[in-house]
Amino acid sequence: MHSLEQRFRDLAAQAAADFAAANDASRLETARARYFGRQGILPDLMKQLGSAPADQRGALGRLANEVKAAVAAALEKRHAEIDRKTTAAPADLDLTLPGRSHRPGRRHPLTQTLDRIVEVFRGLGFAVIEGPEIEDNWHCFDALNTPADHPARDLQDTLYLKDGRLLRTQTSTVQIRVMESHAPPIRIVAPGRVFRRDEVDATHSACFHQIEGLYVDEGVSVADLKGAVDHFFRALLGPRAKTRLRPHFFPYTEPSFEIDCAADALGIRGKEWLEIAGCGMVDPNVFKAVNYDPERWTGFAFGMGIERLAMILHGIDDIRLFYQNDLRFLRQF
């Protein structure tokens, strides 16, 4: 009895010393496992109680419970001491100093503008689709009826990667991907970032945002295009917004148009019309590239820059302000 009893008494003193020597939570956990773990010292001694003489088991059992409780109390006490040390304020921290206020965040002005645009097109039944920013020549140029010798495909205008892929120059690539995987009718808008080798100045950026749309069905006409354009710009810019379609050229639409908006409705002085977007009827060659029958299906497509519309909406004269993260600018929206 003396040997097992002494081992229990020694255990209590040794555990208390080990816990006191542990100066962080990790070392204390190691000490805890040494005494209370499945293969720990305390469980091993408890197993030996069964082999003690019958007339000694009662006294040994009471001693074992007392030692176990004492060791657990020492462990809990040391845990509390380490926790207080960890969470205690530094000696040089003045808790009487006023706190720092945190202003609520808000959406970026470009995000706000995009949300307004999407809301209008959702009301017209358009679904929102996104696509990859790293593209191939097929989706960015070939399928959009843009020939290999077109200036837009030059290294001076397009950012190419070493593997031959490129950073998309327009979100029209999403239109091709949707038509490749879905049969008409289709009614989508595709917002996202695009990349071009533009010199950065007050009106140009090498990375900017576009939203392009596509509507394909039987019997779609220029009248449908004009109606959608007029509705959208009145909803976005106000009921006084007046638009016109001016003939232009895009490889992927025929006929093609620039969309101009009356400048006075936008509060712009010194000019009569402001170019604001591009559009047109989908070129039959684009339909052939995605295996649509151009004799059956017609459609229109359009595209516009988010930054340009945000600049018009808020009277901003420098596109670089959107990317400088100046809180004095961003907090105005």
Image (tube, grey):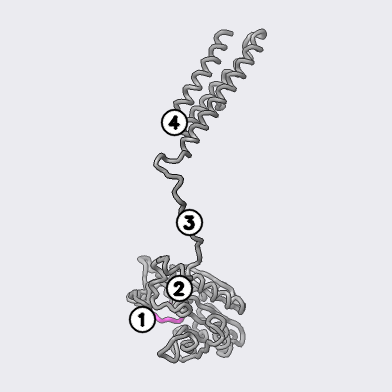
Q: Is residue 143 visible?
A: no
Q: Which mark is residue 151?
A: 1
Q: Nearer the viewer, mark 1 or mark 2?
A: 2
Q: Earlier in the sequence, mark 4 or mark 2?
A: 4
Specify start and end residues of the magenta stretch as a single range: 141-152
Q: Amino acid under label 4? A: Asn
| Cα gap from disc 4 to disc 1, whole angstroms | 70 Å
Name the spot of residue 239 as percent of width and height, x first: 56, 86
Query: On the image, numbered disc 4 is attached to which residue?
Result: 23
| Cα gap from disc 4 to disc 2, whole angstroms | 55 Å
Q: Residues within 10 Å of mark 2 (few under 14, many from 20)?
A: some
Whether residue 11 appears in magenta in the rendering, the answer is no
Answer yes or no: do the residues labelled 4 and 2 have beta carbons within 8 Å?
Answer: no
| Cα gap from disc 1 to disc 3, whole angstroms | 53 Å
Q: Amino acid under label 2? A: His
Q: Nearer the viewer, mark 1 or mark 3?
A: 3
